[in-house]
Amino acid sequence: MIQPHGGSLINKDLPKVEKERILRQVDDFETIQVNPQTLKIIKNIGFGVFSPLEGFLNENNYRYVLEHMYLENNVAWPFPIVLDVPERKANSLNVDDRIILVDSIGNPIALMDIEDIYGYDKKEYAKKVYGTLDRNHPGVDSVFNMKEKLIGGDIFLINEPKSIFPELDLKPIETRVLFKQKKWDRVVAFQTRNPPHLGHEYIQKAGLTYVDGLFINPVIGKKKVGDFLDEVIIKAYQVLIDEYYPKDRVVLSTFETEMRYAGPKEAIFHAIARKNFGCDHIIIGRDHAGVGDFYGPYDAHKIFDHFPDLGIEPIKFRSFSKCSKCNSVVNDKICPHPPEMQKFFAGREIRAALQSGKPPDPEVMRPEVASVILQYKNPFVS
Amino acid sequence: MNEEEHKVEYTTVSIPKPLAEKIKERMKGTGFSSVSSYVTYVLRQVLSSIEADERSKQVFTKEEEEKVKQRLRDLGYID
């Protein structure tokens, strides 16, 4: 099985004895309240999804990653993972302080050793990560809403943040043990933030043909208005797998993280996370992690050429459609027929049908999947 | 423990003749009395190196693995 990114699976979950000791002294620590997205980052760092990161980036690594998409120790890392705090709070803290990160109701979540307190340029951050300063880009908008200062340093988990779907929330050590139990040596990951249509099913099964197992890993967490609800995506996949997939060849598990819509850089980020889960391949489709027209349709394919040492292999799919002449789902590499013979899997048309309460064309979406989605009065983030 | 229990059993492994000749040349002056003993020595070294490599690449311990397997059973991912 593929090694974790950076060579070892990070585990920052403190032993029970240590947790209890800290919790007895919790009032002695300065605290910083973090938002739900940061809680997810803490959890992902803590359980190794973001290996080799052991905490939030210090200033040197922040700048190096922004500039080079590598950490200072020469491990690929596409964009900064940072903790932002108000300036006033930052001014009350010092390097080498040990603080506690708490959730919105004050529950202690993690210990943090402050290595760095530093300023940053939001424009530089947004431009280098997202390639634009357009506030219509949700990622750029998030950057401009960040607090004034950044804090870097290692974190140590005290309390695991709650899972949204606990029965589907597998950690990297769990997926790796699971893949070993299943005797899966080669595993392809499929990253998604949408319910499946037949095009998705086609590329997943095409990928599965060449490996031992398929890891369907929907992103669960903060998304933009108009995206599908997390619950809808999960239920849609559960019915699709039940009805149309060989169950011993598929694992469905959630990846709790916010979507940054960083296009190609996020494709690398997604690949690294799935590498840590134990996957040695990842399917990368058209406009992966994109939004609007901010990125070229195949920028997320090209960026992998800059990371020959990434370890996890992208399986790149371009466009796919249902060809009336071939009478099957095809992609543009294998089908010679003209556009008028193609039925494309257009997200807009699928949404329009669902929004009007009708199932999409069964040649585009399985009726069972459509039926699950239509049980929801409003299946979209509003 | 008696002599029978100390006895090591052997099996025959075939190697191409040119390779055996090459080994004989290499063995000269080494103290190995036979191609078999030389090959046994080399293979033990190679296997030991592979096993050490595998151990260093273990992402989880046996204990961690058993604990995780129980959680996977509870969640229905494995029987």
Image: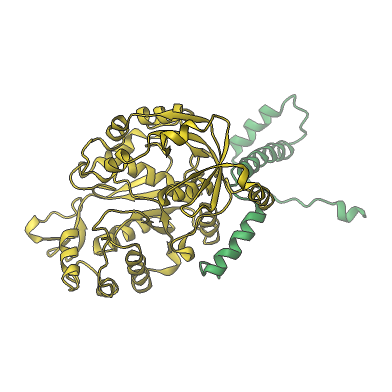
Chain colours: A yellow, B green
Kindly indicate the quadrant of the structure image that contains residue A265. Answer: top left
Q: Position of residue A359 (x, y in %)?
A: 19, 73
Q: Position of residue A353 (x, y in %)?
A: 16, 68
Above or below, B75 relative to B7 = below
Can residue A280 be spotted in the picture? no
Q: Nearer the viewer, residue A350 or B43?
A: A350
Above or below, A204 relative to A245 = above
Kindly indicate the quadrant of the structure image that contains residue A344. Answer: bottom left
Quadrant where the C terminus of chain A lies? bottom left
Q: Nearer the viewer, residue A41 or A313?
A: A41
Judge left or right: residue A261 versus residue A217: left
Above or below, A357 relative to A215 = below
* Residue at 60 percent of width and 65 percent of height: B70
* Residue at 25 percent of width and 56 percent of height: A225
Q: Position of residue A35 (x, y in %)?
A: 42, 49
Can residue A233 be spotted in the picture? yes
Q: Position of residue A136 (x, y in %)?
A: 21, 44
* Residue at 59 percent of width and 42 percent of height: A29
Query: In this view, which residue lies farthest toward the left?
Result: A340
Judge left or right: residue A307 versus residue A43: left
Numbered marks: total: 0
Query: In this view, which residue lies farthest toward the right?
Result: B2
